Amino acid sequence: MKSYIRGKHILAVDDEEDILETIEDILDEARIDRARDYETASEKIKKTRYDLVILDIMGVNGLQLLEEATERNIPAVMLTAHAVNPETLMESIRKGAISYLPKETLADLDEFLESLLGAHERGEPSWKLLFEKLGDYFNERFGEDWKEKDKAFWSDFSRTYQVGKGIQQRLAKDERLRSMGV
């Protein structure tokens, strides 16, 4: 079976050293660069072409780093413990993240990333995959009717899975698509 992680160059950003060590251990087939603060991560995103960035939200200004990664056409996965809430999830979608994972799922990071990167490479909606895998988790965490508050957003999201300017910007910069006249 093809590995979508093997050989990838990934930037992991988190202010907690133990989380970075865990990511490195779990993603041992990839080449991992690390950053523990916004400034270091921002500099690395500007200077290096990564296949993926994994961004904590709190403590490292992860949503700003998400914008910077999206501008450089680098897929980003948000990984958070303290910012697991519907508002941050929606903001991650709007700003172009390909996924949003609670740190509670860290032990399964390699499996999630294999599925997500595979879907992303095939042009399939990575968000649909996330909600198929973690929909029950979000319902338990946020309450069964958590999408009702922002019904228009979620209705549009469910209908199209083409969400936010971030994804559109990233697609516009994708050489494979531009060469096809898209």
Image (tube, grey):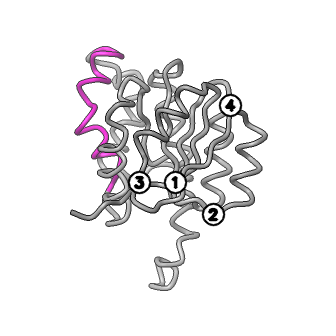
Q: Position of residue 96 (x, y in %)?
A: 53, 49
Amino acid type at circle 4 is Val
> Considering only order in the chain, which callout, 3 or 2, is on the residue closer to the N terminus?
3
Q: Between label 3 and label 4, give the one nearer the viewer.
A: 3
Highlighted range, magenta? 125-143
Question: In the figure, is residue 17 to the left or right of 141?
Answer: right
> Considering only order in the chain, which callout, 4 or 1, is on the residue closer to the N terminus?
1
Name which residue lies at 49% across and 41% down: 24
Q: Which numbered disc covers residue 22?
A: none
* Residue identifier under label 2: 49
Amino acid type at circle 3 is Glu
* Crowding near the residue tagged with mark 1, few <14, some 14–19, many ≥20 C-alpha atoms within 10 Å: many
* Crowding near the residue tagged with mark 2, few <14, some 14–19, many ≥20 C-alpha atoms within 10 Å: some
Distance of label 2 from label 1 (alpha carbons): 9 Å
Q: Are marks 1 and 4 in contact (CB under 8 Å)?
A: no
Distance of label 4 from label 2 (alpha carbons): 20 Å
Amino acid type at circle 1 is Leu
Q: Are marks 2 and 3 in contact (CB under 8 Å)?
A: no
Distance of label 3 from label 4 (alpha carbons): 25 Å
